[in-house]
Image: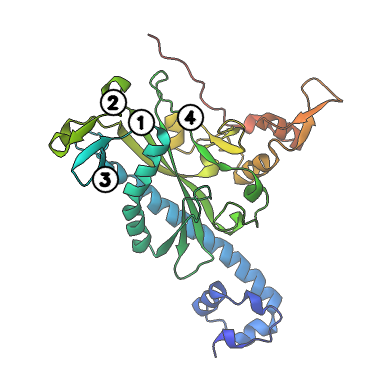
Amino acid sequence: MNIKNYTLLKFNDLFNLPIELFMNKYNIGYNEVINDKRTFLKIFKKWEAKNIMNEKEQFLKKLKKFADTLTDYVSTNEGDWSIKGFIDIDEQIYTISSDTKIISKILEIQLFPKFKEFAEENGYKIVLAEKQNWYPDLSFVKIDDENIKFAVDIKTTYKLDEYDGFCNGFTLGSHGEYFRNRTSNKNIQFPYAEYTAHICLGILYTRAISADIDETEILELSKLKNITSVISNLIFFAEEKWKISSDRGGSGNTANIGSIDYIEDLLNGNGVFKNLGEQVFDEYWINQGVLQVLKPNSTTEYKKLTKLTEFLNFKGMDISLINQPKPKKKNKK
């Protein structure tokens, strides 16, 4: 008999698809469960944690491989962005602004068919953020087990001409309400705790020289190949958010997590929390700007937490575990 028919079990709410999969895989019968519920649940929880970890590793591995294919998809043979502008019904082309928000949105639109293809090939469905300012951009939900969800946020930034090997950095989402309260539905598609992993799909690019771009220009379709792409040399990568995080905010006065900005470290997941792990990343950003810590060289005055060293000192942890970001050095003229 299907286990869903046993409605009198005290822990019936736990009998969902993962438990059925577990029981079927190991030929565990209903009577065995009833005879020793505590042991069963203990074993199941271990299996579930291992299963989720395997899903996470497999998804991230496939997403990284997928990201490696995207440069060719959006680029010309010369390495320029294949999008040149907007076209109207009179076949006139309006060139694109170099504004980062416009570039980001057009890239998202261009890439969506590929994301959909990736999801279908790997047994996932995509749930888009219902509102513009909600996190994440894409939620990948496993079709045969909707408890497994991956948050994928698309982030773009440009390489810095004056600092070799550096970019302008990303904002990696808020550390406000939904980050601190992991069951909150505020500004997030699903509660933060429901996601198996939080991943950044990062896009790095080189900006065109401003003198080569005329945003007021309108060209005929026959002149398409003469239009200078506003960006070029695109690099795509996928990495868990905590692995590329810094300990500083990402933008102005808003409660956003900032990324590291050395490109090689971004591509290899060598963020500030590399040696500390995801739990410390979570605890730090939950408390950043909220927790009161002693001011330097004071035993009576307090300030809001703003640095990872302050947090580790507060926790009694070794500050040498911080993976220090590479310092910027301006190019010599």
Local crowd at mark 2 within 10 Å, few (<14), some, or many (≥20)? Answer: some
Q: Is residue 296 left or right of residue 149?
A: right
- The answer to whether the residues at label 1 and label 4 have Cβ atoms under 8 Å apart is no
Q: Which residue is mark 1?
A: 98
Q: Amino acid at mark 4?
A: Asp
Cα separation, mark 1 vs mark 4, equals 20 Å
Q: Which residue is mark 4?
A: 261
Cα separation, mark 2 vs mark 1, equals 8 Å
Q: Which residue is mark 2?
A: 213
Return the disc, 1 or 4, that comes first in the chain's sequence.
1
Q: Which residue is mark 3?
A: 73
Question: Residue 86 sits in which quadrant?
Answer: top left
- The answer to whether the residues at label 2 and label 4 have Cβ atoms under 8 Å apart is no
Query: At x 24% / y 39%, what residue is drawn?
Result: 82
Nearer to us: label 4 or label 3: 3
Q: Which residue is farthest left?
A: 222
- The answer to whether the residues at label 2 and label 1 have Cβ atoms under 8 Å apart is yes
Question: Residue 161 sits in which quadrant?
Answer: top left
Q: Which residue is farthest bottom?
A: 1
Nearer to us: label 2 or label 3: 2
